[in-house]
Image (spheres, grey):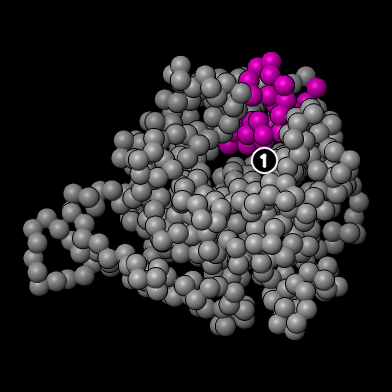
Amino acid sequence: MDGRESGVPDVRSPQQRSPQCSIRTVSSPLQIPGFSLVSIRSSPFDDLGIGFLAILSLDLIFSLELQRDKHIEFLTNGLRQLGPSFCVLDANRPWLCYWILHSIALLGDSVDDELENNTIDFLSRCQDPNGGYGGGPGQMPHLATTYAAINALITLGGHRSLSSINRGKVYTFLRRMKDPSGAFRMHDAGEMDVRACYTAISVASVLNILDDELVKGVGNFILSCQTYEGGISGEPGSEAHGGYTFCGLATMVLIGEVNRLDLTSLIDWVVFRQGVEGGFQGRTNKLVDGCYSFWQGGVFALIQKLHSIIEEQLRLLDAGGSAIDSPQIASTSCHSGQRGLHDTSGSAKFSNIGFNFLEEPAEMEPLFHSIALQQYIILCSQLQEGGFRDKPGKHRDYYHTCYCLSGLSVAQYSYSKDADSPPLPRAVFGPYSNLLEPIHPLYNVILDLYHEAHEFFSTS
């Protein structure tokens, strides 16, 4: 189904408009012992003269599979003990917990009770008496590690984990990080950027403590970071970047102001970040990197649910106007979470935006080549001994393992119309056993675990 059939204007580039690709084995009169001819047809990159026709040894078909057991072994060993070389990440220990736990959860597994309790105890020691989480016990609280710690605790799930979060103190910390300009600082006297805005708003939203005081001015700051290219930079005047584009777009959804962004130019920028290798680059004229499978792929997951705003912005452009200077745009509800947003006060109007965002069906098909992205992740980023990397020639690490798997999940579910719909086999590269758990694209936590946390923090 293309844009015309669904009533959605086709905003894709010519390279993006080809049919969904499929994997088929091609019979040939030429019998080559030990080899199979595998072709990925209808690739959007064929227009560039770069096809995905490949002759694969039967021994290499193994590499099409997600090496779950090896990944879980690599991840679990890292959560139990890290070598001396990791001392350089001493201020990132909650991040290591999140990257590892989220990766294990994406693979459909969990840690044992002892490791779970040890992780909860450790993260509790990272919680500052005055609110927020530091990079380790006794370290100053920081928005990035606060986001990582809370996502890790949500990923563990259960009453002990979720109740260990002091929401009142977290709120106090977020208010302390709030700058009069509307943006947030990463830590006391720290830098202000889009990343700080996202981590603060994401934490407040998922903990159900988001209110007008935290939201005030954030949208204006994000808008000042949307560049002439269409993507979003870390701060005004900088270059558009995949990570900041995801953070900016997700933040604007969570505060109910996504309609203020020029989504048409944002789409123009992000669709050209997928390289001929199938992976995504973070910035213009850069190499692809496995981690952008999520940072850019996650942008597409959000865009698919913003159909009504994008359609209106395109209509205005076709009429010779501006994409964001219309009363209709200002009042458009991008999803049910924003309907009636201005009819309530305090935190109540923000409490269900993340939840209701899931209820809105994905009216648009993905604007990226999901099979090509999955191919890059599994064939280029995956290591057969466990873990994922930036690209061939690089070493595996927990950061890239987390975001390669997160991007793989986004790609696998990109043709699902709603959160409860499992993907068709043709949407999954390799065997269907490669299928991962679905995530909530605004927070990057497992969907079922998000629902558990949403219910817990809505009633406690």
Mark 1 Cα-neighbour bin, 10 Å: few <14, some 14–19, many ≥20: many
Q: Quadrant of the C terminus?
A: top right
**Vertical placement of 420 versus 82: above or below?**
below
Type of amino acid at the residue the image marks with label 1: Ala
Q: Is residue 28 magenta?
A: no
Query: Residue 91: percent from the left, percent from the top?
Result: 61, 23
Query: Residue 139: percent from the left, percent from the top?
Result: 68, 19
Q: Quick check: 154 left or right of 177?
A: left
Q: Quick check: 37 left or right of 391?
A: left
**Vertical placement of 140 versus 200: above or below?**
above
Q: Quadrant of residue 196?
A: top right
Span of residues in magenta: 130-155
Q: Is residue 154 visible?
A: no
**Vertical placement of 16 versus 338: above or below?**
below
**Vertical placement of 160 versus 382: above or below?**
above
Q: Is residue 134 magenta?
A: yes
Q: Residue at x 46, y 51 (%)?
A: 288
Q: Secondary structure at mark 1?
A: helix
Query: Residue 1: percent from the left, percent from the top?
Result: 50, 78
Q: Residue at x 25, y 62 (%)?
A: 54
Q: Quadrant of residue 141?
A: top right
Residue topped by disc 1:
453
Q: Residue at x 46, y 20 (%)?
A: 85
Query: Residue 358: percent from the left, percent from the top?
Result: 65, 57
Given residues 414 and 235, the one toward you in this image is 235
Q: How many marks?
A: 1
Q: Is residue 100 visible?
A: yes
